Every structure is written in C-alpha cells, then in structure tokens.
Image (tube, rainbow, N blue to C red):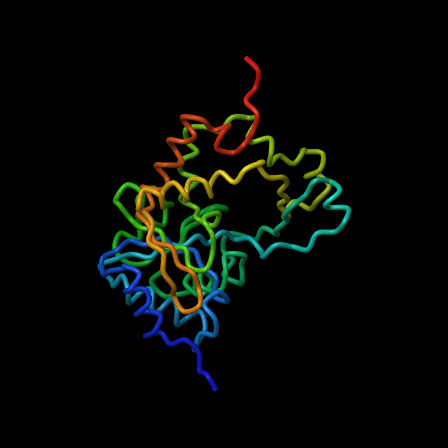
Amino acid sequence: MNAGLSQDAILSDLRALGIQPGDALEVHSSLSALGRVADGAGAVVDALMAAVGPEGALIMSAFPLSKPLPLTEQDRARGITGMVRRYGEDWRGPTGMGAIADSFLRRTGVLVGDGLHRVAAWGREAECHRAGYGHLLATGGKALLLGVDIYRCTSMHYAEHVGIPPEVSACYDVPASVSALYPEDVLVFGGATPEPGWSKVLAEAERRGLVTRGRVGAAEALLFVAADVVGIYEQALRDDPYGLFGVARPAP
C-alpha cells in the first residue's frame, strides 16, 4: 500500500519549484490537492518550514471563519452565493483556510495577528508579518499557491487601496435588508463580476514570465514575487477597472 507523500518528497518538490532558504513566503493551500500525504497537514507545514528555514518566514491567512455553509434555495433566491460562520478571534479549531493553514496556526512559535483578517506568521520578522501582508509586499516576499487558484491569494487585495468603482463593487453587494435576515455571526456574500479580473492579472503576469508553475505531489503549484502580481492588479485598477472586470462604464 502507498504510504503517501513524505515530508522529504514535499520538500524536494518545493526546492524544484524554486523556494530557497531565506524566502519570505505567503502560502495558500489545499491538502487534498496534494494527494495522500503521510502524516497529513503537519508534514506539509514541516516541509514548508524546512524549505524557507529559520532565516526565512512563512505567512498564512488565519481568518476565524468556517468552511462554506450549505445554501438553501431560499438563500440563492436572495442572491446569496456564499455563507460562512465567524468565530471569535481566539478560535484555533478548523476553519475555511484549510487543514495546512489550521495546522500552522497551532504551531509553537507561530505569531497570530488580530481581527477578522488575522494573519499567522513564523520565522524571520514574524512580528512584522503578523500585522498583514504589507511587509511581505514591501520586502520582495513570494506567494505560493499550492493546489488553489489566484482567488485565494489574500495579498492581492492590497492593490485595492487605489479604489474600486462602485459599479464594480455592486456586483458583490448583498443588500443590508438581506444580511439582516441572518445571525450576526454569519457572513453572507453575493454575486460576481461578469469577467474574472484576477485571472486576467495572473495571465498577464505569466505572459511577462513572472510566474513559475510546477507540482508539489499531485497539486499544481504557482510561485511568484507577490508584489509583481499585486502591482499588475494595482495598475489595471488605475488604468481600466471596468474593462478588467467586464463591467459597463457609466455614461459621462
């Protein structure tokens, strides 16, 4: 019987992808995408720590939110496309961030930030990284997408400080009258833009040769300098946010 992917095999794949000691690495991941892993999520965390070493850093989103809750037909009729439960900030149980991020969060030496969008960090300058992804972006840190797509990359949101037109934001809006129908600890989401803006950003980054693709176990893996891809998104928001998301520009 196949014992599953070992920590050493994961580390070898991470090295082949281009991750080196000293890297500061934003990680978003899916354990199931890797295939069977001997010793589970903990082995992946061990491999990631070994890959960057104590002179590097690991940073993962640790939002205290559940996995997506099931939607009823009534939810969908209200325009709801996603729903999660919010936990308290001291929550260390399973979350929607995935088993690898959950295992990392509970590790000795991992520092955890505050708020709904809290971040967990380990290694060099962890105290800075625990405050969010700004330090990673400012210092040339990398992002690793391990079996997940660009829409899991939290640092992308940092480009949005330039502003998003209300016509684009409206694509995701859930009316307050609808949100009020749900318990306070349940967050509801709705809608999508006509075109996938972040996928376009990633495609442009790949066209410029800024993204390395490979595999870690059975999972597709993408590695890039986070600020490079976030910068493309920021420029697109400045130049033509309507075209990026396929939203009609308002009449003058």
Would you identify the image quadrant in which residue 162 lies? top left
Residue 163 vertical position relative to residue 65 in the rendered view, above or below? above
Residue 223 vertical position relative to residue 43 in the rendered view, above or below? above
Residue 111 vertical position relative to residue 209 in the rendered view, above or below? below
Q: What residue do we see at 57% from left, 53% from top?
A: 87
Q: What residue do we see at 71% from left, 34% from top?
A: 177
Front-most of residues 16 and 135: 16
Q: Residue furthest front?
A: 207
- Where residue 37 sits in the image (x, y, percent)? 44, 74
Residue 134 vertical position relative to residue 107 in the rendered view, above or below? above
Would you identify the image quadrant in which residue 202 lies? top left
Q: What residue do we see at 63% from left, 39% from top?
A: 191
Would residue 123 appear left or right of 66 to someone viewing this image?
left
Would residue 5 appear left or right of 57 to someone viewing this image?
right
Q: How many marks?
A: 0
- Where residue 65 sits in the image (x, y, percent)? 55, 53
Would residue 193 appear left or right of 49 to someone viewing this image?
right
Front-most of residues 1 and 143: 1
Q: Residue furthest top?
A: 252
- Where residue 189 sits in the image (x, y, percent)? 62, 42
Q: Residue furthest bottom?
A: 1
- Where residue 251 sits in the image (x, y, percent)? 57, 15
Quadrant of the rendering where the C terminus is positioned: top right
